[in-house]
Image (tube, grey):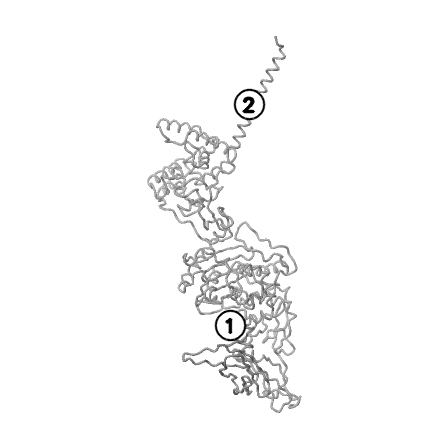
Amino acid sequence: MKPVRSLTMNKILTYIKHHKFKAAVIFIVLLLYYLCLPKQLFKDPTATVITSANNELLGAMIAKDGQWRFPQNDTVPEKFKICILQFEDAHFYQHPGFNPVSIFKALKENLSSDGVKRGGSTITQQVIRLSRKGQSRTYFEKIKELILATRLEFRASKEKILSYYASNAPFGGNVVGLDAASWRYFNRDATQLSWAESATLAVLPNAPSLIYPGKNQERLLEKRNRLLEKLMQEEIIDTLTYQLSIAELLPQKPYELPQIAPHLLQKVATTHFGKRVQTSIRKPIQEQVNRIVYNHYNNLKQNEIYNAAVLVLDVKTRKVLAYVGNTPTDKAHEKDVDVIDKPRSTGSILKPFLYAAMLDAGDILPNTLVADVPTQFGSYNPENFNKQYDGAVPASRALSRSLNVPSVRMLQEFGLDRFHHYLKALQLKDLTYNANHYGLTLILGGAESNLWDLCKSYAALSSTLNHFNETSSEYYTNEFSEPTFLASETIDFGKKTSEKTLFDAASIYLTYESLKEVNRPEGNENWEFYDSSKQIAWKTGTSFGFRDAWAIGTTKDYVVGVWVGNADGEGRPGLVGVQTAAPILFDVFDILPNSDWFTKPFDEMQEVDICVQSGYRAGPNCDHRVQKFIQRSGLKTEPCPFHILVHLDRNEQFQVNSSCEDLNAMIHKSWFVLPPLMEYYYKAQNPFYKALPPFREDCLGENATVMEFIYPKENNTIFLPKDFDGQTNDLILKVAHSKPATLVFWYLDERYLGSTKDIHEFAMQPKQGKHVITIVDEFGNESKRWIQISE
């Protein structure tokens, strides 16, 4: 007989072993229960969706599986929430994921009818069924759904479960989720749906393959109205709302989703495919810019110009407010190409950067006279757009009128490598070659850039000027940062510094002052001064062959950039910046709020005496001077070189000296004198220009006569064409003489040809080969030109 103590111990050990096993089983069951629900319920591909800064839909790109399925939205509109709960699961907030009463009723009805007549599933169970695609609807599967539903209730809140349902329920055809359904069927956001519309969408997932807009309308209407009646009975809506709701018509066919910024949608999809992205776009501005581009496109296509792009930036935040990558043309004309980031020839759009660089370096003052005369650098022969020359023109006017010859001469004087360095600092990514690759054509469109980078650069300059005036004369280290089209991104402008980033504030301000003086085009060819209430610094550009037309403008608050042309690079007559791009630019500025003009950066400027006629710092001989604020670097520019002190007789008709006139009888006068070639063209444009009087014949020791070739240029290769009769045309030689009445003698290879007086032009027909042309005036002054005549 065993002791009592031994029996007790055995029972205890058996009890422990038995409960350890039960605990292990319970642990395993709980672990399996915990792990039975996937971390990510829905893995279906979703559409790429972009919204505005105010979260308004701008466009969507269909999911990879061909379904209109928007990304998960955790917010469910109140009206739809009420409708879906009243229709599908009135006790949603009370049950643990399943409703025993509903299950019992459904089971009883299905068994008695020998088929599935009633579901009995809660919304939580339906979420599980939606996530387990393709599963057969068996009782065993129902048990799985029930278990998973309770697990989901532990993991997620009721609101989250509702959002799962709303985002993944089928709504007929290839429409999945409330957001997509709302736009496809009612062309509006789900938060804006009426009670009738919300009720319609609430009943659709119940049988989306049998009932949806355009199919079985009677059954759909019956189900919708029954739900609306229930809402009235539950006193959720009043009788009047019910009557108005049942009077609403059902949608007949799906709407196209909005495509307000299709090219931005493409851009977003490259990095955020299948995501919902809130952009910085202002929808009202975007829609108005779309209409502007559409209206101009209808006119431009009459001249076979099919493409255009517009970018609008906020200077202070550096965010994109409007993004129009192309016109609404057709596929044959590349409507899907986003031109904003494509490299195109810059035309004259880089000229303001050269002007600002020369101001910043102290090489010129705003109105310094620069030469505008026939010019040749090797085989390169730049010409102004109008084929005319002013002789001499203020640098600011050369910029505002976009004169080519002064710009090329300024670039040559400033230095090609030096300017190339400035452009690289602007981070123009399409500027991929060294300076010598582009040559002097760099300033006239020899390089390529894109609308994004150019607008970014103008915005950086405007922001530099704004920050300087807002921060007690300081700059930021990261002023030339990339703009953003994402609402969530903020631009880091870096740290404050006393050192300029690239251009000083005064040079930028003076550049904008010049660009502000450009005339505004009205209509096709008419010009009038732009309304001063909208002060805009703007610049146009036209590439060689009329392939690209540009217009970029900036105010204190906004930068607007416009490109017009053909995406395939075909040039068209009339494709000129001022005629095609500028009108779009000003139409866009007209829809933007007015901006104050930039504040003058006095801390980077100094007031000095400026010679009125030459624009240089006033020298001792400048008698007409005015005080102007210039950039501090401009203090090192030379005094006016064009004013000299001359000695005249009593009548001021002749120059005299001590050999022919008593000192007391002389009149000493300041005189504005240009070099002969500049003078030749300048006096034609400036009738008040007075040439320097000649010396009186009885004066000795003075021989200040000068002459210069106008044509041909130095070491020029010339082709003489034939006319319709087969006769070779003459070569017309031209010379500018400081004293036009002087007799000039012409020689070809030391062979005398003849003489001219007053108008120094001579026609000749040299033979093929190399020649030297020599001119000698009656005072013995001589000049030569070497040329080559080709076949």
* Viewer-proximal residue among 338 and 245: 338
The quarter of the rendered structure image containing the N terminus is: top right
Q: Position of residue 135 (x, y in %)?
A: 43, 34
Q: Position of residue 36 (x, y in %)?
A: 51, 32
Q: Residues within 10 Å of mark 1 (few under 14, many from 20)?
A: some
Q: Which residue is mark 2?
A: 22
Q: Are marks 1 and 2 in contact (CB under 8 Å)?
A: no
Left or right of 595 on screen, residue 290: left
Q: Position of residue 3 (x, y in %)?
A: 63, 10
Left or right of 636 on screen, residue 273: left
The image quadrant that residue 173 belongs to is top left
Q: Is residue 87 above or below residue 500?
A: above
Left or right of 340 on screen, residue 650: right
Residue type pointed to by label 1: Asn
Q: Which residue is mark 1?
A: 384
* Viewer-proximal residue among 271 and 392: 271
Q: Is residue 499 above or below residue 168?
A: below
The image quadrant that residue 190 belongs to is top left
Residue type pointed to by label 2: Lys
The image quadrant that residue 392 belongs to is bottom right
Q: Position of residue 116 (x, y in %)?
A: 37, 31
Q: CA distance from mark 1 to mark 2?
A: 96 Å
Disc 2 is placed on an element classified as helix
Q: Earlier in the sequence, mark 1 or mark 2?
A: 2
